[in-house]
Image (cartoon, rainbow, N blue to C red):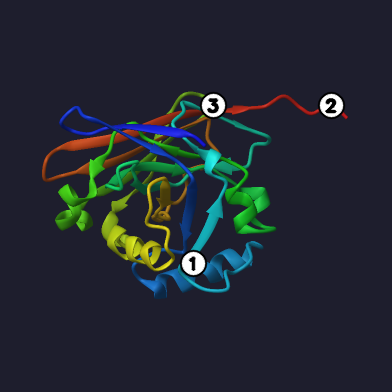
């Protein structure tokens, strides 16, 4: 199982041995907006979930702190998210994450597409208890870089658009999964129009306006060689 290491604002370090990885989906705070989004996705062939919000189990080895994501084709992309991490002491941490998803496979099954790429996590984190009272003010942003090296903003919003870490921690508690080694990825915020999500690089930031603190991750998207046979 992957061992993840996070640095807190005071310089201390926490580890989490990922034994359980879960991706929330259709996790907007407004479920009316979620229903409209489900209808839009259905028009392009993405199957509707049986219920919303959804929760997709993902292979734990896909929880990665990496600067490179290798892909099999050109139609993959990330999503700006926060991650709730139960560290090895049982403390709850919050960090930035990017769920890199196979969009071709998504049309056949969302759960399959989530298992076709990593959930990239930042190397910094906050204790959830330290930011819980201002969760809705935390800002999520994502930038993509095209093949020519130009970076553009693709996502920008607040955690108020998503179901809260408190909501998901209660779900995990009810499932008996609020245990050391659990990592839950939040679901994402809308993408801005007219920006190509199929990018050569991704950068995701989780920022706290109250303190000016920033958690950031970045990675390159690298095509794998064509298969033989």
At a point 46% along the width and 28% down the height, the residue shown is 66
- The residues tagged by marks 2 and 1 sit, at their Cα atoms, a distance apart of 39 Å
Residue 159: which disc?
A: none
> In this view of the protein, which residue sits in the foreground, 45 or 178?
178
Q: Position of residue 81 (x, y in %)?
A: 38, 48
At a point 48% along the width and 53% down the height, the residue shown is 22
**88 over 167 or under it: above or below:** above
Residue 147: which disc?
A: 3
Mark 1 sits on what residue? 37
> In this view of the protein, which residue sits in the foreground, 114 or 31?
114
> In this view of the protein, which residue sits in the foreground, 203 or 170?
170
Quadrant of the frame with the C terminus: top right
Q: Position of residue 228 (x, y in %)?
A: 84, 26
**49 over 75 or under it: above or below:** below
Give the mark toward the camera: 2 or 1.
2
**12 over 37 or under it: above or below:** above
């Amino acid at each position: 199982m992957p061992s993840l290491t996070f640095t807190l604002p005071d310089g201390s370090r926490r580890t989490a041995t990922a034994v359980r990885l879960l991706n929330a989906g259709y996790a907007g705070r407004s479920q009316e907006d979620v229903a409209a989004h489900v209808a839009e996705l259905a028009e392009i062939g993405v199957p509707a979930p049986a219920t919303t919000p959804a929760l997709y189990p993902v292979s734990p080895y896909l929880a990665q702190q990496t600067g490179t994501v290798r892909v099999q084709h050109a139609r993959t992309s990330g999503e700006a998210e926060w991650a709730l991490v139960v560290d090895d002491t049982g403390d709850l941490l919050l960090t930035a994450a990017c769920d890199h998803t196979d969009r071709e496979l998504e049309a056949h099954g969302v759960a399959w597409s989530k298992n076709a790429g990593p959930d990239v996590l930042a190397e910094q984190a906050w204790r959830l208890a330290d930011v819980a009272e201002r969760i809705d003010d935390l800002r999520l942003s994502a930038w993509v870089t095209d093949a020519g090296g130009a970076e553009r903003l693709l996502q920008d919003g607040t955690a108020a658009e998503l179901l809260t870490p408190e909501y998901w921690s209660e779900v995990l508690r009810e499932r008996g999964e609020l245990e050391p080694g659990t990592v839950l990825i939040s679901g994402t915020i809308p993408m801005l129009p007219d920006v190509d999500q199929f990018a050569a690089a991704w950068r995701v930031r989780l920022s706290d306006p109250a303190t000016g603190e920033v958690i950031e991750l970045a990675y390159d998207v690298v095509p794998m060689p064509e298969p033989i046979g």
